[in-house]
Amino acid sequence: MSLATKLLTGLLVLLLPLKVLGWDWQTRVTVVVKDQPLQVVCEILEKTYGIHFSYSRELVNLSRKVTITAYRQRLKNVLEEVFTPYDIRYTRVGDQLVLQTIVCSTRTISGYVQDAATGEKLPGATIYSPSLRQGTTTNQYGYFSFTSAKDTGAYLFSYVGYEPLLQHISGIGNRLVTINLPPAGSLQEVVISASDETKIQNQTQMSKIGLPLSMVQAMPKLLGEADVMRTLQALPGVSGSMDGAGGLHVRGGSPDQNLVLMDGSPVFNFSHFFGIYSLLNADLIKSTDLYKGAFPARFGGRLSSVVDVSLKDGDMKNYHGDAAIGMISAKINVEGPIKKDKTSFIISGRRSYPDLVYNAIFKSTPGSGSLYVYFYDVNAKVNHIFSPKDRIFFSFYKGEDNLRIKQSPTDSSSQSGMKVENSKFRIGWGNTIGAVRWNHIYGPKLFSNVTVNYSEYVFTSEIWLKSVTKRTGEITDQSGRYGSRMKDIGGKIDFDYRPTPRHGIRFGAALMGHHFRPGRSDYEDKNSPVKPLDTLNTSIDTRGLEMTVYAEDDWQVGRNFYANVGLHASGFVVDGRFYYSLQPRLGLRYMLPDNWALKGAYTHMNQYIHMLSNNGMPLPTDIWVPSTQRVAPMFSQQVAAGLAKTVKDMTYEFSLEGYFKSMSNMIEPTDPGLTNFELTKWDEQVTVGKGWSYGGEILLKKQKGKTTGWVGYTLAWSTRRFPGVNNGNIFPYKYDRRHDLEVILAHKLSKNWELSAAWHFATGTPLTLPVASYHSVNGASPWDPGGIDNGGIDRYGTRYNYRTQNVHRLDVGITYTKQKKWWRKSWNFSIYNVYNQSNPFFYYLKTDDEARQRYLSKVSIMPILPSITYSVKF
């Protein structure tokens, strides 16, 4: 061999490894194949990029077909896409990629369950393995993770209102999947037994009720509006305020003790029209969960309940919407893809219009003035998928109520030679809520959600009066304004970790800043040299910082014994004072013979904010204030026990629960007649005490068939004790209702007609009345109402010494629906208070001058009210 040949051969030997080893995991490759064996992909990579594969044909099957379109993608990403679904592991050894089949005893399937037609993620959907008799559910974002044996076979996916799907997931490695469930009725009937996981006896969580949207829509409508809060009032353990108002009192708690979450953001006042409507547009709601006790560790900040509302994300595939017009309001919702299967939106608007009707009728009437009384709200949400493991949500809500009265002078008054007057009066309140959320999947067993949110509640009232004395030319120009504001801004991160089917672990942290600014008032007289400010109440401006960490584990301890163990730790910094709280949570479930579940729970809750109110309703004038040096945070401890069972293939569900709840650091005005707090000293005008509530609840639900609904009964007591009030003795509180009975029915008459009815009965609530009235020095009479104008003085005895009358009411509704080619129309006819029962809205003392006595009188504002609503879905 010549010297030149030897040198050339040596050079080739040296350069060959450089060529072969000239690739790494980040090398950009292009592979385009359609329905070809894996072996073809290996040949393309070997011929084009010098990547050699080594494997055993007996152990690794490369005949399985694959489709991939990758242009200048990273090599590692391409390899993962083609090999991972077939449980093939690849390892670099020198200049080769060694292929091996993964051999394991378990695997984890994870991913999302969604609506097949819209791509909407389904929270609370069930994943069940019939062979293992084990399962799990999707979280609030529709995500699940389930680890099982490699030969599990088929999985059953199900969700209320959707066709169940029995899905075979091939292979033995981990899978990230998306399961599409078709809405019920879109396919022929599939006969599959309901999974055990959906049965109430197989859920460790107690004192929780999931509210089907179908039942909200089927309920009789008040003035044409379906209402989630009104439906919640029909559940055992939950009552409303006076008839027609929408406040929630849960297990003897007050309205401020309810945490209402809209897509994870807190809502401070959830009512429109003084409580007649709620701010939650029922057409936008995806799911609603009510927790009355046994609170999971991830929730905190309130004592009585959590109402967790998830809104729809928007259709990823098609554009559609709906619109409705009722007796006093109208609304429209539109949703669809911005980029199909990638980005979606949903937007809605709603407005009431009694002011438009009034002004149209009375506009030409002299001296009638103008009346504007209305509410509106707007919801908007955008959902974007960055990758199979990342998605982001932007959501926004703005809602407001307004009452404005404008009075102008009549022709007669302007010609009388005395005065010409103009006046304006306005009150308004509303919420502004915004949030950004990011979902991320770290691996098959770990999911996280990061949220940044903003929530603000504002109340304002204004009055303006201008008068001119024509004889003297004297001008009076006065105005006043009062306002209150509560604002939260913060962030939180939540993790969902599912290591095995025996453990479901959640943990996270949150930081929330509170800004309280209630009671700001201004008064101005333009003709006076003195410009006083804050003459009504001296406002306060306080900031607080709330910190939270939590962890919980839904744990299968043994074959028949389950536990949910958690700890919620929080701290609150306000005015240089630091409060902290450790709140243990424990839920237990033991399976008895014949599939009865015996459940028990202990819950410790803490609340750092208080509401100043003298009524039983969450009115817009109620004021939120933080804990102070004198008034510590409220806290409660609740124990509960019960039995639960689902029978006849999920047709009937039965639950029985008893509970006892003690509450500390409750506040109560020292003067029962006090209606106006001096805010800088509000904590000196209240007394701090304890409360107790206890009782039992029964719920029987029928979930299948032409007739569905429930019967709920509550037997309850709610008491309080405050130093210096009622001689320090325990007394029944204003939220004490002994008996509460609800009967809800919905019946499918035919394909197009559905009938619904709701009957409600509740015993009256306690009321504080004076026991005597005294003459004043100027000789005022004892029957002067309140004795204020003439100096009379009322004397009060025991607190809440009178119980009001029982209330009951029947509501009915019927809905006609007709499917057209491109759209669907429906008519709803509802009658609220069918037999015109005169239930009280509030009570007052009335004076009879002739009889020289005072007596208790009631005001009823909700007589029989028929309504009609027309809606279309397109």
Image: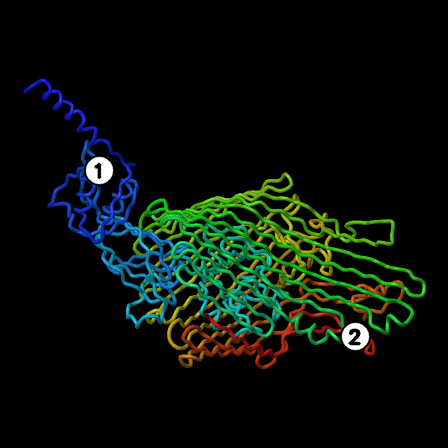
> Which one is in front, 158 or 753?
753
Residue 668 x/y as whole percent = 66, 56
> Which one is in front, 162 or 593?
162
Where the C terminus falls, by quadrant?
A: bottom left
Residue 307 x/y as whole percent = 51, 59
Read off the residue under disc 1. 49
Label 1, secondary structure: give it: helix
Q: Residues within 10 Å of mark 1 (few under 14, many from 20)?
A: some
Residue 665 x/y as whole percent = 61, 51
The residue that appears at 42% across and 81% down in the rendered structure is 749
* Quarter holding residue 795: bottom right
Residue 91 higher or lower than 611, as above or below: above
Label 2, secondary structure: give it: loop
In the rendered structure, the answer to whether residue 725 lies left or right of residue 664 reads: right
In the rendered structure, the answer to whether residue 73 lies left or right of residue 222 reads: left
Residue 208 x/y as whole percent = 45, 60
The three-letter code of the residue at mark 2 reads Pro
Residue 703 higher or lower than 581, as above or below: below
Q: How many marks?
A: 2
* Rendered image: mark on residue 366: 2
> Which one is in front, 581 or 17?
17
Q: Nearer the viewer, mark 1 or mark 2?
A: 1
* Quarter holding residue 575: top right
> Which one is in front, 30 or 518?
30
Earlier-in-chain disc, 1 versus 2? 1
The three-letter code of the residue at mark 1 reads Tyr
Residue lying at the far left of the rendered structure: 1
Where the N terminus falls, by quadrant?
A: top left
Camera sees residue 616: yes
Q: Residues within 10 Å of mark 2 (few under 14, many from 20)?
A: few
The CA distance from mark 1 to mark 2 is: 90 Å
